[in-house]
Amino acid sequence: YDDSSIQNKQNHVSIIAHRGASAYAPEHTIAAYELAKEMGSDYIEIDLQLTKDGHLVAMHDVTVNRTTNGFGFVKNLTLKDIKKLNAGSTFNKRYPDLAKPLYNKQKVPTIDEIFQHFGNDVHYYIETKSPQYGVGIEQKLFNKFKQYNIDTERVIVQSFSKKSLKTLHKLDSKLKLVQLIKYARHAKISAQQIQELKTYASGVGPNASSLNPTYIQHIRKHQLDVHPYTVNSKKEMKRLIDWGVTGMFTNTPDLLYRMLHN
Ligand code: G3P
Ligand code: CA
């Protein structure tokens, strides 16, 4: 029999809307997060950068150049500077078929605005980006959970930085943490690496292109989650579900929702 599909039937597969429903709306805007929620996503994925004056904003890149009508490094801009920018006009120009007047009104959101807007109505999957720039980003995030009464059982924090995750683990040992990994080729992990991971993380987030069933089964045997990024085609979604992943980052959460719920 096919062992991996049997395992798959026992798995819950989480739909993680990568930068919101970012195939259809400008990434990291309230509009993209709202759409992700409407499409039945389990988690809204948020990348965080720290501004010059210490605010946490939702932004993937270290600069505002690609996703807004402005220029410069986030770390060199104040929140006031960033709030002057349009976070949807570039998307509208780049994708005229998907353009909407609503998108033209989008600003770069702070984590405060996101938590105020969604509260505990959604689950959050937050990445501490560029922790080398954002000194103290972990403590700041932790303070925001408290300030806005966010139920941390509804939160996963992810990072490529082990140091950042270990800092978070020290702040709250119950917080679910996922170690992001980028494998150059075939994903592989040693028993020793898994043991170390288990001291602070509840799962791994590898690049989907590197995955193979052996790796996934190895991780799953240790009751760790496997959440690959970024999966946007039905064919790849199906293959990864068959291999036993427990969730995936996707720009097209509607496709994954239909696959899991039909
Ligand atoms: O966080 C998972 C995935 O988003 C990592 O890649 O570059 O899109 O943040 P990136
Ligand atoms: Ca990310």
Image (cartoon, rainbow, N blue to C red):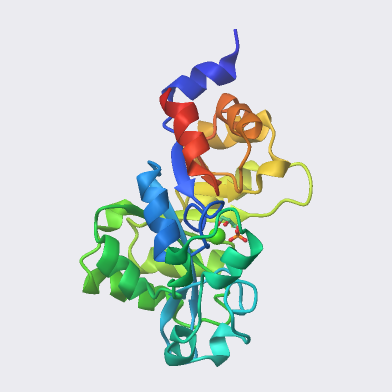
Q: Is residue 190 above or below residue 64?
A: above
Residue 80 location (% of width, % of height) = 42, 91
Ligand 2 falls in which quarter? Answer: bottom right
Q: Residue sitting at 55 percent across and 87 percent down? A: 75
Q: Residue sitting at 59 percent across and 62 percent down? A: 160
For this rendering, which residue is in front, 219 or 59? Answer: 59
Residue 9 location (% of width, % of height) = 45, 20
Residue 240 location (% of width, % of height) = 60, 32
Instruction: Answer with left or right where residue 141 lies relative to residue 219.
Output: left
Q: Is residue 121 visible?
A: yes
Instruction: Answer with left or right where residue 173 lies relative to residue 220.
Output: left
Q: Is residue 28 above or below residue 71?
A: above
Q: Residue sitting at 62 percent across and 80 percent down? A: 63
Quadrant of image for the C terminus: top left
Residue 179 location (% of width, % of height) = 54, 55
Q: How many marks?
A: 0
Q: Is residue 222 visible?
A: no
Instruction: Answer with left or right where residue 71 lies relative to residue 52.
Output: right
Q: Residue sitting at 56 percent across and 51 percent down? A: 23
Q: Residue furthest top?
A: 1
Instruction: Answer with left or right where residue 260 lies relative to residue 112.
Output: right
Q: Residue furthest right?
A: 185
Quadrant of image for the N terminus: top right
